[in-house]
Image (spheres, helix red, strand yellow):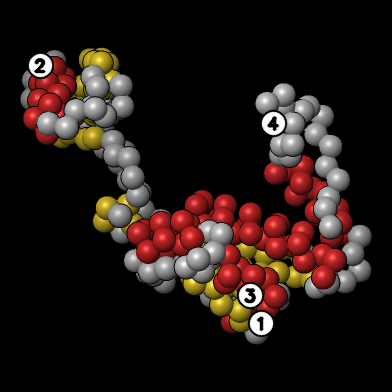
Amino acid sequence: MSLTVSPQFTPALDPGFVPAVLWNRAYAAKVANDSGSRKLDLALVRTDGTAFRWSGTILAADPANDVLTIKYVERLVKFLLWQKGGSRILVAGAPDVAIALSEIYSESGLRKFDRDFIGTKIFGEPISVKAVRSVEELPEENGAAMSLGRNLEGCRIGFDLGGSDRKCAALIDGEVVFSEEVVWDPYFQSDPQYHIDGIHDTLKRAAAHLPRVDAIGGSSAGVYVNNEIR
């Protein structure tokens, strides 16, 4: 079974493209007209005990609906894993969906990359999927909030190491007194000294506009969990 979705505009280079938002609306409309629709609750649990909860409605369990429902939930779970994070997926209200997700996120499944990257690399364990008997067995949503930065007093330097240029700024009590971008080419430079010299040059350029340096902050790409680089 498929859904009929007709975008207003058709991309010339990808005429078969269907925006996810339109497909999801079509699925939701079908669910609204399904007298056997059912509640689905998900929990993404992280290794530190925090959890994210999602709740919604899906089509009735029926072979004619399964392809659509699995596509909907698979896309949803993939998005939530990358948006919220987690390595343990708990499913309430649809054991058939849990079975399908287990296969999709298995060692040889369609989402093997996500299983290894989000699960093993970031959270230290492969992504697992488990069906629970009722929504009451799902953990409550909880997450840690941390206030970062907001320290503007004194003489500070901020820098960003981009793929094509280095950016830096010098501030005194929150006021920018110097900023610049310097072109560089780090991607193709295998000598660590090239990178060290570039960073030192950027910091010295900014420091020259300050009476002293109280703090230095640099931007970082990548994933950090509980203050650890993953």
- Secondary structure, mark 3, is helix
> Mark 2 or mark 4, which has the lower sequence index?
4
| Circle 3 residues within 10 Å: few <14, some 14–19, many ≥20 | some
Residue 135 relative to residue 44: left or right: right
Select label 1 or label 2 by which is in front. Answer: 1
Residue 134: assigned label? 1
The residue sitting at 23% across, 19% down in the picture is 184
Q: Is residue 25 above or below residue 128?
A: above
* Quarter that holds the N terminus: bottom right
| Circle 4 residues within 10 Å: few <14, some 14–19, many ≥20 | few
Of 94 and 1, the residue lying toward us:
1
- Identify residue type, mark 2: Ala
- Secondary structure, mark 1, is loop
> Mark 3 or mark 4, which has the lower sequence index?
4
Q: Position of residue 113 (x, y in %)?
A: 46, 56
Residue 85 can be seen, yes or no:
no
Quadrant of residue 169 in the image?
top left
Q: Which residue is mark 3?
A: 99
